Amino acid sequence: MKSVLFSVFFLLLPWMIIVIIMIDFDGKRVVRAPFTGRHGGTHAVTQGVVTKNQSALQIIYAITPTYTRPVQKAELTRVAHAFRQVTRFHWIVVEDSTSRTELVTRFLRGCGVPYTHLNVYTPQRFKRKGMPRATEQRNLALTWLRQHRSHRDPGVVYFADDDNAYSLEVFEEMRDTRAVSVWPVGFAGGRTYERPLVSKGKVVGWYTGWRAGRPFAIDMAGFAVNLNVILANPQALFKRQGSKPGMQESDFLKQITKVSELEPKANNCTRVLVWHTRTENPHLAKEVKYIKDKDTVAVEV
Ligand SMILES: *[C@@H]1O[C@H](CO)[C@@H](O)[C@H](O)[C@H]1NC(C)=O
Ligand SMILES: *[C@@H]1O[C@H](CO)[C@@H](O)[C@H](O)[C@H]1NC(C)=O
């Protein structure tokens, strides 16, 4: 009896091993799927998400003002690596310069992101400490959208500065913005993070370390606006007159929405998916010392 049992066991053993190996293979395929999905992030990428009709998604228009400085190309490279992975994405890059520079032109050609390249020079009198920055550049991008897009183009507008770090998830969150959506921003407002306070699915206040009395105490990277709202409010622009640094967001949002109408994203504004990291200025003192000893080759940095 015992020997019969043994022979049955050994007869079945190879088959059991084959079945175990096949289950293991299947398991690996399932595990690997999220990493190959275009959306990335921590969501389990189910078949439904991967095969979702992409042309039905609203296009994200990311507006990035930029200006010539030692770290410019490094910053643009870093943010482009995130943007390139976002489906249905259009990058509007606006240079603070009298013409489109060769460096940015070349960079954009090779960056792998669909883009529009614009430029407008900030008048010298506004280039002072205590003045809001990138006003003219953001406004030019808004004007471009109003001239080149219509109510038939579903889209979401996001002010994506080049000194931030973006998770791919922040773009998933803003994608279905109906009017104006909001979420937390890391390292903003003088604290580890700044966020809209949400109660019963509505924004009721702000968690911040700086000017809590602002009507919208939010960083530029913490909100997105449906393109239709931009088109329906042609007068809505970033203001020079009477606007102080740090009040630009509030002054702009006041023109297009109310706090009670904001759409909280990122799990009722409890997850940080974008960080106002900024890049430390590189130490370039030796450039002055060796000013007469320049490289014989022109190297773009
Ligand atoms: C995808 O969505 C677009 C826009 O809603 C629609 O025109 C198109 O027919 C859809 N395609 C498929 C395969 O469902
Ligand atoms: C946000 O809060 C509302 C109201 O409390 C709740 O119904 C909803 O499920 C919450 N959303 C998320 C993503 O947690």
Image: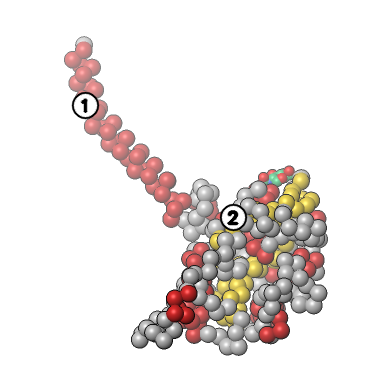
Can you tell which of label 2 and label 1 is closer to the viewer? 2
Quick check: marks 2 and 1 in contact, CB under 8 Å?
no
Res. 225 in view: yes
Using the rendered image of the protein, determine whether residue 52 is visible from the camera's viewpoint: no
Give me the residue at 72% from left, 73% from top: 130
**Residue 94, how many percent across, how many down?**
60, 78
Label 1's element? helix
* Disc 2/disc 1 C-alpha distance (Å): 55 Å
Q: Disc number at residue 11?
A: 1
In the rendered image, residue 184, in percent from the top left (x then y), is placed at 66, 54
Residue type, numbered disc 1 = Leu
The image shows residue 148 at horizontal and vertical percentages of: 66, 80
Residue shown at 54%/65% (left/top)? 279
Task: Give the colour scheme of this rendering.
Answer: secondary structure
Which part of the image, by quadrant, shows the N terminus?
top left
State the mark number for residue 196: none
Q: Is residue 143 left or right of residue 214?
A: left
111 relative position to 55: left or right: left
Toward the bottom, the furthest residue is 98
Q: Quadrant of residue 255?
A: bottom right
Q: Nearer the viewer, residue 125 or 63?
A: 125
Judged from the image, the secondary structure of the residue bearing numbered disc 2 is loop
Q: Which residue is mark 2?
A: 273
The residue sitting at 62% across, 55% down in the picture is 186
Q: Residues within 10 Å of mark 1 (few under 14, many from 20)?
A: few
Label 2 or label 1, whichever comes before in sequence order: 1
Front residue of this view, candidates 114 and 253:
253
Q: Residue at x 19, y 21 (%)?
A: 7
What x and y, as percent, mark residue 11?
21, 26
Q: Amino acid at mark 2?
A: Leu
